[in-house]
């Protein structure tokens, strides 16, 4: 599975509808300071179910909504969608029937987040599990943030093991087991 398209609207600096195709191979994002490169990567993390606003450099989840600048008024919604190519049918159940998977997340002021997978409303957990499972395999949508290498080196053994499990793709299995046990 790999990412093929990222669409944003009202997310941080991306006030206008932005549609970015993601070609196979290496993609670089270039631009002057403050143009939104990091915001773009944060949008990817956000749509994959990031629940910590602090790690998105925000002081509340609604801070990801365009706050207004340069005479343009603020928005009331932010939406990001990420399309995955699943033509090899490697996505976990119950999503492996479709050749393309579109995951979207929308936040509205005062109403919180709404997640969809291929148009169907799902829980945040479903999106997190989809990506936790998808992190297995060579083309995994793994994200390595700045400072992560140092974090791995300096981590205590149990923490380091969790990072390695995440990279190996077994984190999704553990999360499912925990969810099953808590029922
Ligand atoms: P650098 O090269 O310095 O790393 P960058 O291209 O990564 O820069 P970002 O950090 O992605 O830039 O963007 C920072 C800009 O995003 C700031 O100007 C900040 O004001 C703006 N920004 C962040 N959140 C919002 C928001 N909710 N609404 C409008 N603008 C926002
Ligand atoms: Mg940056």
Image (cartoon, helix red, strand yellow):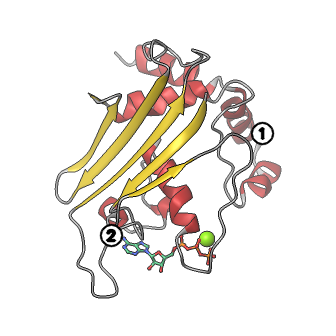
| Image point (48%, 27%), residue name | 129
Q: What element carries label 2?
A: loop
> Judging from the image, what secondary structure is the residue with disc 1 in?
helix
Q: Where is residue 130 in the image (x, y as percent from the top left)?
A: 49, 27
The answer to whether 63 appears left or right of 181 in the picture is left
Q: Is mark 2 within 8 Å of ligand 1?
A: yes
Spot occupied by residue 42 in the image (x, y as percentages of width and height): 51, 57
Q: Which of 177 and 115 is in front in this view?
A: 115
Q: Is residue 177 above or below residue 160?
A: above
Q: In which quarter of the image is ligand 2?
A: bottom right
Residue identified by numbered label 2:
66
Q: Residue furthest right?
A: 153
Q: Mark 1 points at which residue?
A: 157
**Residue 145 vs residue 84, the one in the foreground:** 84
| Quarter where residue 127 is shown | top left
Please name the residue shown 35% across and 68% down the image.
Answer: 15
Determine the residue positioned at 42% across, 21% down: 179
Does residue 33 lie above or below 53 as drawn?
Answer: below
Q: How far apart are marks 1 and 2 (CA)?
A: 40 Å
Residue 134, position in %: x, y?
59, 26
Q: Quadrant of the N terminus?
A: top right
For the C terminus, the quadrant is top left
Mark 1 vs 2: CB contact within 8 A: no
Q: In this view, does 127 lie to the left or right of 78?
A: right
Whether residue 49 is visible here, answered yes or no, is: no
Query: Label 1 crowding class (10 Å Cα cut-off): few <14, some 14-19, many 20+?
Result: few
- Among all residues in the image, which is located at the extreme left? 110
Residue sitting at 29 percent across and 78 percent down? 68
Examine the rendering and report whether any part of residue 151 can be seen.
yes
Instruction: Say which label, 1 or 2, has the lower sequence index.
Output: 2
Is residue 143 placed above or below 141 in the rendered structure? Answer: below
- In the picture provided, is 15 more to the left or to the right than 148? left
């Amino acid at each position: 599975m790999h990412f093929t398209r990222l669409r944003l609207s009202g997310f941080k600096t991306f006030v206008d509808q932005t549609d970015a195709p993601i070609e196979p191979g290496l993609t670089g994002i270039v631009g002057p300071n403050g143009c939104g490169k990091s915001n773009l990567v944060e949008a990817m993390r956000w749509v994959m179910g990031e629940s910590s606003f602090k790690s998105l450099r925000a002081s509340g989840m609604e801070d990801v909504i365009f706050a207004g600048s340069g005479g343009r008024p603020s928005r009331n919604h932010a939406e990001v969608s990420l399309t995955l190519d699943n033509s090899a049918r490697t996505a976990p159940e119950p999503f492996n029937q479709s050749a393309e998977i579109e995951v979207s997340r929308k936040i509205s002021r005062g109403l919180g987040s709404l997640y969809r997978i291929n148009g169907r409303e799902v829980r945040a957990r479903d999106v997190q599990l989809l990506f936790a499972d998808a992190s297995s395999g060579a083309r995994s949508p793994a994200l390595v943030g700045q400072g992560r290498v140092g974090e791995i080196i300096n981590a205590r053994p149990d923490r380091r093991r969790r990072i390695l499990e995440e990279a190996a793709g077994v984190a999704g299995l553990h999360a499912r087991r925990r969810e099953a046990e808590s029922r």
